[in-house]
Amino acid sequence: MKTPKGLQPLVDDGLIDEVLLPLKSGKEASVYVVRAGDAVLCAKVYKDMAQRSFQARVSYQEGRQVRGSRQARAISRASKFGRREQEEEWKNTEVDALYRLADAGVCVPRPHGYFHGVLLMALV
């Protein structure tokens, strides 16, 4: 299969060897089955804000803490920097939650890393 654009940096960096097949595409991301050495993993490629059809983003993110006051001001003013920061916060929230849940023993796909906006995790 041809390597999707979002996964090419991981192939170039040697983090994954091959994209085996697309698994699912949704409103916020596309998931692919990939091979990394002898392991078969999932790669969740998050869609950029302009490509997503998730309209309830504002209420979904309401009440979330932002790292610093500079980021919070930029996000509230919707500056270019603020939109970029909001995008990164949105992506990092799920990644952080998966790590915390897995560490607590909850049955979730074990994360293997977050690189270039792509979450590598166990295939379950």
Image: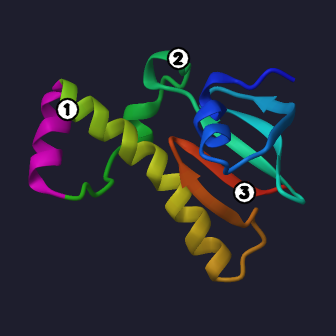
Residue 117 shown in magenta = no
Residue 68 at what x, y percent from top left?
A: 15, 57
The local secondary structure at tag 3 comes to: strand
Disc 2 to disc 1: CB gap under 8 Å: no
Residue identifier under label 1: 81
| Residue at image point 38% right, 36% down | 87
Disc 3 to disc 2: CB gap under 8 Å: no
Nearer the observer, 48 or 52 = 48
| Residue at image point 54% right, 63% down | 97
Residue identifier under label 3: 121
Magenta stretch bounds = 68-79
Residue 78 shown in magenta = yes
Residue 26 at what x, y percent from top left?
A: 70, 28
User: Reading the chain from its start, which is encountered first: label 2 or label 1?
Assistant: 2
Whether residue 15 sits left or right of residue 19 in the image: it is left
Crowding near pointer 1: few (<14 within 10 Å), some, many (20+)? some
Disc 1 to disc 3: CB gap under 8 Å: no
Which coloring applies here? Answer: rainbow
| Residue at image point 28% right, 58% down | 65
Amino acid type at mark 1: Phe
Amino acid type at mark 3: Met
